[in-house]
């Protein structure tokens, strides 16, 4: 995969280990799915994208999502 996790200095809420950032992933919100998206081009109306930073715990393997810092 080729990414280098970066330590955040923040602790895991479950086990207390230091979290690493996996990066920012864009999640699709709204819109339509299924047959509507296959049959009609209007299925994407009202659709948006929400960027969330993914934090992972290397010890207990849990993940957390947060709004990324601006800048």
Image (cartoon, rainbow, N blue to C red):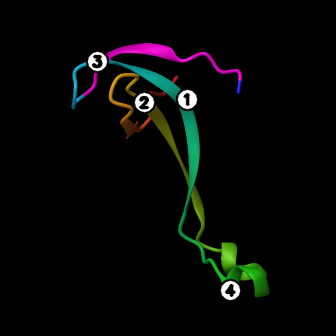
- Lower position in the chain sequence, tag 2 or tag 3: 3
x and y percent of residue 35 in the render?
69, 86
Q: Does the residue at mark 2 contact the one at mark 3 (Cβ under 8 Å)?
A: no
Q: What stretch of residues is rendered in magenta?
A: 2-12
- Lower position in the chain sequence, tag 1 or tag 4: 1
Q: Would residue 47 be found to the left or right of residue 59 on screen?
A: right
Mark 3 sits on what residue? 17
Q: Residue at x 68, y 79 (%)?
A: 43
Q: Which mark is residue 55?
A: 2
Mark 4 sits on what residue? 36
Q: Would residue 7 be found to the left or right of residue 17 on screen?
A: right
Real-space Cα distance between discs 4 and 3?
Answer: 44 Å
Front tag of 2 and 3: 3
Real-space Cα distance between discs 2 and 3?
Answer: 12 Å
Q: Does the residue at mark 2 contact the one at mark 4 (Cβ under 8 Å)?
A: no
Q: Would residue 13 be found to the left or right of residue 44 on screen?
A: left
Between 61 and 40, the one lying in front of the other is 61
Real-space Cα distance between discs 2 and 4?
Answer: 34 Å
Real-space Cα distance between discs 1 and 3?
Answer: 18 Å
Front tag of 2 and 4: 2
Dot 4 surroundings within 10 Å: few (below 14), some, or many (20 or more)? few
Residue 15 appears in which quarter of the rendering? top left
- Lower position in the chain sequence, tag 4 or tag 3: 3
Q: Secondary structure at mark 4?
A: helix
- Lower position in the chain sequence, tag 2 or tag 4: 4
Q: Residue at x 60, y 67 (%)?
A: 47
Dot 3 surroundings within 10 Å: few (below 14), some, or many (20 or more)? some
């Amino acid at each position: 995969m080729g990414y280098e996790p970066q330590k955040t200095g923040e602790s895991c809420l479950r086990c207390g280990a230091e979290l690493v950032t996996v990066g920012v992933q864009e999640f699709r919100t709204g819109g339509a799915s299924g047959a509507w998206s296959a049959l009609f081009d209007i299925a994407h109306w009202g659709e948006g994208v929400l960027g969330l930073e993914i934090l992972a715990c290397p010890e207990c393997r849990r993940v957390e999502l947060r709004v990324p810092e601006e800048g």
